[in-house]
Amino acid sequence: MNLQPRQRVTVQDEYEILASFEVIREVTNGITIDSAAITADGNGDKIIKKGMPMAKLIASGKYVPYNDAGADGSQNPTVILKRTVNVKDGDHVVGGYEVAKVISARIPVTVDDTLRGKMPNIVFA
C-alpha cells in the first residue's frame, strides 16, 4: 500500500523561489510593470517569469526586467517578481519581494557577483 501523496493538479509556475520564510518583506501596493518596454514573443505575449529581478526606470518610474547593460535605470534591480505575469494587454501591478532569501537556481537570470552586489537585501542561496 502506497500512502505517499500524489499530485493531481499542476498549476503553472508553482515552483517556489523562496529558500526561507523567516525574513520576507513584500513591496507595499506592488510595482507597476511597463508593458511598452517589454518585447513580445512570437505569439504576441509579453511574459515575465516569476523570480525575475526588476528595476525601476528613471523616466517613467515603472518597472522592467533587470538588464545589466542598461543605462535607463534597468541596470539597478531592487525587487524580485513574486509571480509570472503577461503584460501583453498593458501595464500590470504585481507583487514583489524587497527582502528575501531566494533559490538562485530558480531565478530566470544568471546570479553572479554583480547581481548580488546590486541587490544587498536579497540573499541568493
Image (cartoon, rainbow, N blue to C red):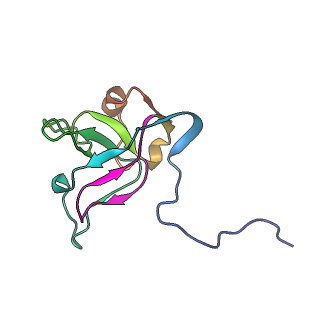
Residue at screen point 59% across, 38% down? 21
How many marks can you see?
0
Vertical arrangement, residue 46 with respect to residue 99, above or below: below
Above or below — where is 55 with respect to 42?
above
Residue 76 as seen in the image, left or right of residue 80: left
State the image coordinates of residue 9 (x, y, percent, origin top left). 59, 72
| Side (left or right) of 48 relative to 10 | left
Q: Nearer the viewer, residue 115 or 38?
A: 38
Query: Could you tell whether 64 is left or right of 106 in the image?
Result: left
118 in relation to 16, above or below: above
Q: Is residue 92 above or below residue 95?
A: below
Task: Give the quadrant of the N terminus.
Answer: bottom right
Residue 49 at what x, y percent from top left? 36, 55
Residue at the far front in the pictured view: 29
Is 16 inside the magenta-drawn segment?
A: no
The image quadrant that residue 42 belongs to is bottom left
Q: Which residues are magenta?
A: 82-98
Residue that appears at 26% across and 42% down: 66
Rendered location of residue 83, percent (x, y): 42, 53
Q: Residue at x 55, y 69 (%)?
A: 10
Q: Can residue 92 be found in the magenta stretch?
A: yes
Please give left or right for residue 45 compared with residue 8 in the image.
left
Q: Quadrant of residue 117?
A: top left
